Image: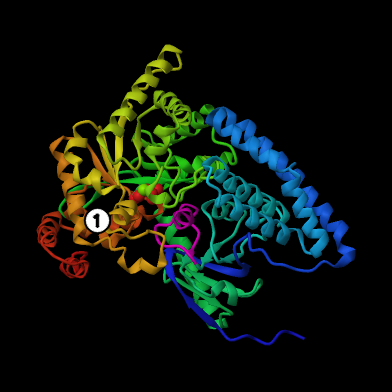
Amino acid sequence: MSEPRRPMRVFSGIAVSGGVAIGRAVSILGPSLEIVRFPIGDEGVAAELERFREAVGETARAIEGTRERSGEFLGAELAAIFGAHALLLVDPSFVGVIEQRIRKERVNAEWAVHQVCQDLRGRFERLEDPYLRERAHDIEDVGRQLLQHLLGGGHRDLSDLPRGVVVVADDLTPSEAIRLGRAGASGFAVASGSLTSHTSIIARSLHLPAVCGLAHAPELVTTDDPVILDGEAGNLIVHPTREVLASYGERQREELAREAAAARATAAPALCADGTEIELMANVDLPEEIADVVRFGARGIGLYRSEFLFLETEPRLPTEEEHYRLYRRLVEGAAPFPAVIRTYDLGGRKLARELMHLEEENPVLGLRGIRLTLARPEIFRTQLRGVIRAAAHGELWVMAPMVSRVEELRRFRALVEELSEEVEREGAGAPRNLRIGIMIEVPAAAVIAETLAREADFFSIGTNDLIQYTLAVDRNNRQVADLYQPLHPALLRMIRSTVLAARAAAIPVSLCGEMAADPRHLPLLLGLGLRRLSLNPRSIPALRAAAGRLQVADLERRVARCLELGTAAEVERELAGALL
Ligand code: PEP
Ligand code: MG
């Protein structure tokens, strides 16, 4: 007997990556480390102890591996921390107590680990001696790794999903999104996230429809439910009716046809209605996208987020050779236009926090971007040598993220120059036209843009972070998503003064935040004086078409008025109708 048809239900969230996915849902619920207590009975104790000991063995092996690799990257001091972790795993006052708890209370190993870690951590945290207080972190760290092994792998096992499924999850990390996309998932519906979160950026990079901010959907959608994900409207439709299914099927076919036509683009500059030329470059996060640079007519690569290279080599950092090989591919893929390689923006909420051993209360204001790389010169040198070697093969521009002071730019330039000489001396080829630039994504940098422009070869404005830091609104926090306003007058003024500073110093300036990919913002950006944007390559055809409907002189007049306005809503009204 066939199952009775269930009523159709529509969940609405934030549209973060366009397109339509039709398929079966796979629901991934809950954080991977949710710990529950369950009794195992007398008969279960021996097996549970065995399971726990296996997890101890696996954790010890993983720590040893990290210790060996980190010795190379992080120096002896940090490698010693892993030594302390390894010792904990043979310490009877840690593992012995956990085993005792499993035996005495007849509980699952996860619960025993969790309880013992909590007790010990509490005790260490109350100690006066700062060295001993630090041990609390070690316990937490090792406890978490043990739990990951007990719960089955360092992360949720997402590798053997059937192809074509729509993943419905509470949250997805950028690396999970990449693994899922590469394993053939056809879309993501996520309860957390925002337009500019890195998971959303990855969905766009992989060209997968995605919707975020879908509170409750993960609990209410069951694996195998038939679903449609509408990445354009931001809807997840569960148990669609036959009519809805048919109309989305039609839309999907039209989209594929449109995309095939768009992919026959040329790399001529986009032209406004009055003949003004706009350079549209590509943001690249994953190697898969290099082919899109040419397919969608990008004039080079305006942003490569090199922290994503770590995802290819995880859990270790890339070697110089791996940096070099990928950057060379980027430079050759962007030719005859430049490829802008951004040095690691690790730290913050981004990747490799654990590898860097960062424990910060407020990581977004912490050791992130250029701050982190300057603080870990061994890591930075490896990357920069790869950059410099690749620069012998074409037009490579190197750029530092999160710059807030002139000193950072100076140290960055000095290091690039020193390493260029080193590489040249070794005979590995001289960089041809290596330019050294910075992201303008911290308000301080926008305010001192004039000073920075005297020492930088180019600017790229990162509005994703510039909005976050200017307005003090977390770019990933749904509670304040309505305050994350790209049209806020403060932001307009920051962009304007940065563009003017770059013009006065005769250096190129582009904008590479997600704002650049939205044709509705194009009138504003052109009116603010920008002529070069970098965006997801698949959005280039739509931007090219939008540019053809704009008169720059009219936009400059409108935007001059916007700069005098007080609210984002007023700016929006002033610009309404600019896109003909
Ligand atoms: C930005 O902040 O606008 C940017 C392009 O960088 P990311 O999104 O990687 O922080
Ligand atoms: Mg940024």
Task: Farthest residue to the right: give it.
Answer: 43
Q: In the figure, is residue 345 to the left or right of 450?
A: right
One can see residue 537 in this view: no
Q: Position of residue 571 (x, y in %)?
A: 18, 66
The stretch drawn in magenta includes residue 197: yes
Which quarter of the picture shows residue 238?
A: bottom right
- Does 16 appear above or below 537? below
Which quarter of the figure is the N terminus placed in?
bottom right
- 159 or 520, which lies in front? 159
Q: In the figure, is residue 531 to the left or right of 289?
A: left
Q: Residue at x 27, y 59 (%)?
A: 471
- 207 or 39, which lies in front? 39
- 317 or 121, which lies in front? 121
Q: Residue at x 55, y 34 (%)?
A: 78
Identify residue for label 1. 547
Q: Position of residue 371 (x, y in %)?
A: 38, 38
Q: Position of residue 406 (x, y in %)?
A: 25, 34
Which quarter of the picture shows residue 543?
A: bottom left
Which quarter of the picture shows residue 388?
A: top left
- Does 181 appear above or below 3? above
Three-letter code, disc 1: Ala
Q: Residue at x 33, y 27 (%)?
A: 434
The stretch drawn in magenta includes residue 374: no
Q: In the figure, is residue 280 to the left or right of 71?
A: left
What is the secondary structure assignment of the residue under circle 1? helix
Which quarter of the figure is the C terminus placed in?
bottom left
User: Which residues make up the magenta segment?
Assistant: 192-210
